[in-house]
Amino acid sequence: MQILRRSPCCWGIKSLSDGSASQSGTVIPHGRDGRATLRGTDMGYKVAIIGATGNVGREMLNVLAEREFPVDEIFALASRRSVGIEVTFGEKTLKCQNLETFDFSKVDFALMSAGGAVSKEWSPKIGATGCIVIDNSSAWRYDVDVPLIVPEVNAEVLVEYMARNNRKNIIANPNCSTAQMVVALKPLHDAARIKRVVVSTYQSVSGAGKEAMDELWAQTKGKYVPGQEVEPKKFPKQIAFNCIPQIDVFMEDGYTKEEWKMLAETKKILDPKIKVTATCVRVPVFVGHSESVNVEFERQMTVAEARSILREAPGIMVVDKRETGGYVTPVEAAGEFATYVSRIREDATVENGLAMWIVSDNLLKGAALNTVQIAETLVNRKLLAKAA
Ligand SMILES: NC(=O)c1ccc[n+]([C@@H]2O[C@H](COP(=O)([O-])OP(=O)(O)OC[C@H]3O[C@@H](n4cnc5c(N)ncnc54)[C@H](OP(=O)(O)O)[C@@H]3O)[C@@H](O)[C@H]2O)c1
């Protein structure tokens, strides 16, 4: 199933607690200012999209075009199965090429979303050519020599990384559930130090790739059409009209790998002292992850203060009307660049506790948008110039 949606960019729009918005201040500038020349011409950069036929790859092409990333040349790459398949980049149509035979010495950026196994094999080879790999898989996220970046939270890590002579030229993008959560937690942590986070996720099927979306679609239809029933294949149980409390494999302690990722990544990106416990659940939603998040702070954080901080935070929109429908659901977040925070309320069962609801498009902030923002950060902060 192909995702047919696009909506106006709302990145950098500041939020008001009633959900209305005013245009002000973009923290990570989007534009051509400060662009450094790498191997490309003065016109821009040469960019390869690896996994261009996939959910995330297609979104990366859309986001690069929509944000007018300074592209000089762009290449769509996938497996040899997809050679010749057409994908779109703005007004242009690109034909997919085979990753295995592509010459990476001619590109500046490889934006990669082709799974962990492909990344483990190819990222070091591509990085060794001098090309910067920004990877969406979990292959490199926990490597101490690879930065794990959400630009609104820890962009400064890139400055130190790009100054290193012996770097791998690989930058990791976090798990989709982690990305949207840390964007919301960062400004609150800066204000009142977070001690502990309890999160339950409601994750859409697009987070498991295009075949997973097809399974939900076919299984849903199959429930109504006799003879067209679809057995679970991508998911461990029926996903249509159901919820599955398992994402990724089980670990020895009873948590799943997805739950462990949220813990490990939050510590690496935000603060190793924060305690996190997660329950990750797959739900029959096509696009958009939701999270119920309880936070314990070192000092009291009132609802009013949290709203006011989040209203000013980059990438966040507060929509919290405390009336029927006065919150954001994944259907409304799909296609949007913002991470939405709703249902902010005091959690009186713990000292200094707040509860909230965080929703974002997992293919955008959870993957493609964050990847492009990392590339924008390198360009706008002139960090690539040091690579020469
Ligand atoms: N979806 C999300 O919300 C999300 C969020 C964060 C991170 N990620 C990560 O991003 C990656 C891709 O996710 P997705 O949802 O886009 O998956 P997807 O829709 O299943 O797409 C997978 C892409 O990888 C390509 N690919 C697979 N094997 C390949 C190979 N051997 N050589 C070259 N290309 C190959 C596929 O090309 P073919 O069409 O030729 O097979 C396709 O373009 C995964 O690592 C995932 O964990 C996803």
Image (spheres, rainbow, N blue to C red):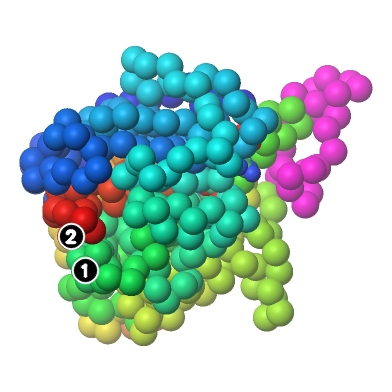
Q: Nearer the viewer, residue 41 or 133?
A: 41
Residue 350 coordinates in the image, percent (x, y): 39, 80
Q: Which mark is residue 30?
A: none
Observer able to see residue 262: no
Q: In percent of the image, x 21 and y 68: which residue is there?
A: 163
Q: In percent of the image, x 33 and y 26: which residue is there?
A: 7
Is residue 368 placed above or below 214 in the rendered structure? below
Which quadrant of the render holds ligand 1? top right
Residue 340 coordinates in the image, percent (x, y): 33, 47
Disc nearer the start of the sequence (1/2): 1
Is residue 126 placed above or below 182 in the rendered structure? above
Q: Nearer the viewer, residue 230 or 94?
A: 94
Residue beneath disc 1: 163
Residue 19 coordinates in the image, percent (x, y): 23, 40
Q: In percent of the image, x 8 and y 41: which residue is there?
A: 33
Q: Amino acid at mark 2?
A: Lys
Q: In percent of the image, x 58 and y 57: which residue is there?
A: 121
* Res 186 quadrant in image: bottom left
In reply to whether residue 231 is colored magenta, the answer given is yes
CB under 8 Å between discs 1 and 2: yes
Residue beneath disc 2: 386
**What's the magenta bit mostly, secondary-structure-wise?**
loop
Q: Amino acid at mark 1?
A: Ala
Magenta region: which residues? Answer: 220-242
